[in-house]
Image (spheres, helix red, strand yellow):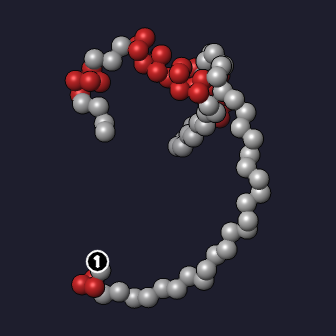
Amino acid sequence: MDPSREELLDLKLDGVMKVVEAQLAAGPLEVNIAGDVDPAELDDLILRYLGTATPGGAAFVEPPAAAPPLTLEPLSLKQVAPGDMV
């Protein structure tokens, strides 16, 4: 559930920092960036804001044993009239 406007306005920096730091310490972090960006500027920003996060609690997770190969079934398409859609 998304927070209400009042809940967002009640947020304090210290509280948000504690939550984010706990999440960063709990496991690996993946950063996805989309759009028209300058990669050099991104590197600087990531190091400035995420590089200052204190590491801790993150543990290496051994990858699972090799999974059996994925079997794909042939794709079959059929035409459906708009009135027949459920």
Residue 45 can be seen in this image: no
Compared to residue 43, the image places residue 68 above or below, namely below
| Viewer-closest of 25 and 67 | 67
Compared to residue 52, the image places residue 2 above or below, namely below
* Element type at mark 1: loop
Across and down, in percent, residue 1 comes to: 31, 39
Tell me what residue is drawn at x 52 percent, y 86 percent. 76
Residue 81 can be seen in this image: yes
Q: Answer few, some or many: residues within 10 Å of disc 1's Cα (few below 14, many 20 plus, some between 14 and 19).
A: few
- Specify the amino acid type for callout 1: Val
| Viewer-closest of 27 and 77 | 27
Compared to residue 11, the image places residue 80 above or below, namely below
User: Looking at the rendering, which quadrant does residue 84 occupy?
Assistant: bottom left
Q: Residue furthest front?
A: 65
Across and down, in percent, residue 26 comes to: 59, 27
User: Looking at the rendering, which quadrant does residue 61 occupy?
Assistant: top right
Across and down, in percent, residue 73 comes to: 61, 80
Q: Residue furthest right?
A: 66
| Viewer-closest of 27 and 14 | 27
Question: Horizontal placement of 46 versus 86: left or right?
Answer: right
Compared to residue 76, the image places residue 40 above or below, namely above
Tell me what residue is drawn at x 23 percent, y 28 percent. 5
Q: Which residue is mark 1?
A: 86
Across and down, in percent, residue 42 comes to: 61, 30
Tell me what residue is drawn at x 33 percent, y 18 percent. 11
Q: Which quadrant: the C terminus? A: bottom left
Question: Horizontal placement of 81 versus 47: left or right?
Answer: left
User: Looking at the rendering, which quadrant does residue 56 occupy?
Assistant: top right
Q: What is the total number of numbered labels drawn onto the structure image?
A: 1
